[in-house]
Amino acid sequence: MNQDARWEMQTFKASDGLSIAYALDDYTDPWKPADTLILIHAAMGSSKRFYAWVPHLARNFRVARIDMRGHGQSGVPGPRQLDQQRLVKDVVELADHIGATRFHVAGSSAGAIVAEKTAIDYPDRVLSLAAFAGTGGIKHARQDQMSWVKRAGEKGLAAFLRETIADRVDLPTAEPGFVDWFIAESSKTPVPVLERFVPMMREFVVIDDLHRIRCPVLAVAPGGDPIHPVDNYRALPDRIPGCEFIVYDGLPHNITDAVPDRCAQDLKRFLLKHSATAR
């Protein structure tokens, strides 16, 4: 079988004309109603980074994995096509495109912030929210993300990621070949896109609006993250009523890639708890 067959993507046209790619994985019983879950990946790479989550989730939920604009197979945004509201609209317009009046949303890192903003702005659409390695904004991280962009431009994205890989995954426990795959996949994002995406995300701060979220929320934090201290992650349970908070002790930032089965199992448990149709 062609190795790319399992990455077959579909597209829809966003309201600003840009082509947005997504994968739809649905192994639910066709005679039963099923909730929709939209997954939003971290900066760099694409929806492929959720590949290991699908077997855990797609039997109970219709799983839609979006390629954020400028990433994966989605179009490269023009000068006026990349901002915070546009990323949120892409999520909602994907839901409209696949016929999901209401949906669960989960995101990783930058994708988690987009998911949080979606829950804030569209409370009548979002059934539940899950934020993995997601704070209320990356502006107050320990590290300067703009220096990342500069280094990536100078060295190439793959070289930059290899130099900083220990900040992202737990190398002693990583599967053989995983690091090479992670770097190859993440470095597909064009550096010019990151040069626009990162400054925009630095100003994407939702911490003061987290209290407006009223749907069930799961927040999962990497306890050994060199990018964000755990206190940054605690903003979610501190500000969102009833938020379930889990810390993965000792793990660096990219938990959704490094321990995908653990993440997906925690998400499935949470979703089953808050979804009438999946019980």
Image: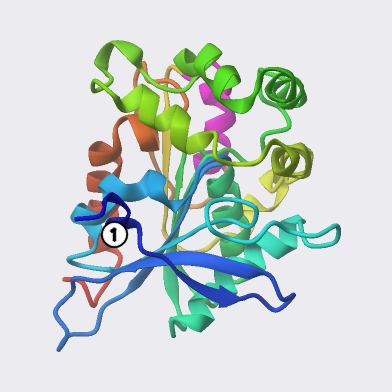
135 left or right of 144 in image: left
- For label 1, count other residues whose C-alpha is less than 10 Å away and answer few (under 14), some (14-19) or many (20+): few
Residue 246 visible in image: no
Which of 149/76 is in front? 76
Disc 1 secondary structure class: helix
In the image, residue 208 lies at what x, y percent?
Answer: 72, 47
- Magenta-drawn segment: 225-238
Answer with the quarter of the image where residue 32 lies. bottom left
The residue where tag 1 is placed is 5
Which of 87/234 is in front? 87
In the image, residue 45 lies at what x, y percent?
Answer: 51, 42
Give yes or no for residue 233 being in the magenta stretch.
yes
Give yes or no for residue 49 being in the magenta stretch.
no
Which of 108/2 is in front? 2
160 left or right of 265 in image: right
Amino acid found under the numbered disc labelled 1: Ala
257 left or right of 168 in image: left
Q: Is residue 194 above or below residue 122?
A: above
